[in-house]
Image (cartoon, rainbow, N blue to C red):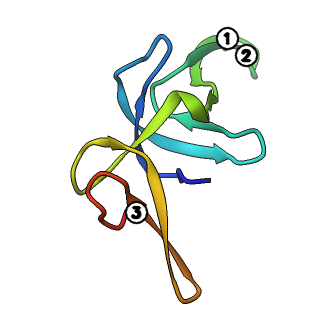
Amino acid sequence: MKIHKGDTVLIISGKYRGKKSKVLKAFPKEQRFLIEGVNLRKKHIRSRKEGEKGQIVELPAPIYISNIKLICPKCKKATKVGYKIEGNKKDRICKKCGQKI
């Protein structure tokens, strides 16, 4: 997968379109990502101890890979990701500016 944990991405479709955020976790088999503050779902949590109240917590749900685009840290633009192979090393490069990501 061309996008990794810790990358900054731009949401290109859906309710959160236009928002820039950080990737928290990647799920390569499902081609989905958990993105900070995007696609939030409410989860009802039962109380653990007697006398304690239950809670409603907002957690991010995974978003599909086709709905996001990587933001190049060098040129600060949403871009496609390419690869440049040097020996046994495979580097990600920005298709717009050509710099290593």
Q: Front-most of 48 and 95?
A: 95
Lateral position of residue 26 relative to residue 47, left or right: left
At x 64%, y 29%, the residue is 62
Would you place residue 93 above or below residue 50 in this image? below
Mark 3 element type: strand
In space, the residues marked 3 and 2 are separated at their CA atoms by 48 Å
- The picture places residue 86, in percent across and down from the top left corner, at 49, 84
Would you place residue 16 above or below residue 24 in this image? above
In space, the residues marked 3 and 1 are separated at their CA atoms by 47 Å
- The picture places residue 72, in percent across and down from the top left corner, at 32, 51
Q: Front-most of 8 and 72?
A: 72
Mark 2 element type: loop
- Check disc 3 and report the residue beneath it: 93
Q: Front-most of 99 and 45?
A: 99
Q: Residues within 10 Å of mark 3 (few under 14, many from 20)?
A: some
- Check disc 1 and report the residue beneath it: 54
At x 47%, y 59%, the residue is 82
Lateral position of residue 76 relative to residue 28, left or right: left
- Check disc 2 and report the residue beneath it: 47
Residue type at numbered disc 3: Ile
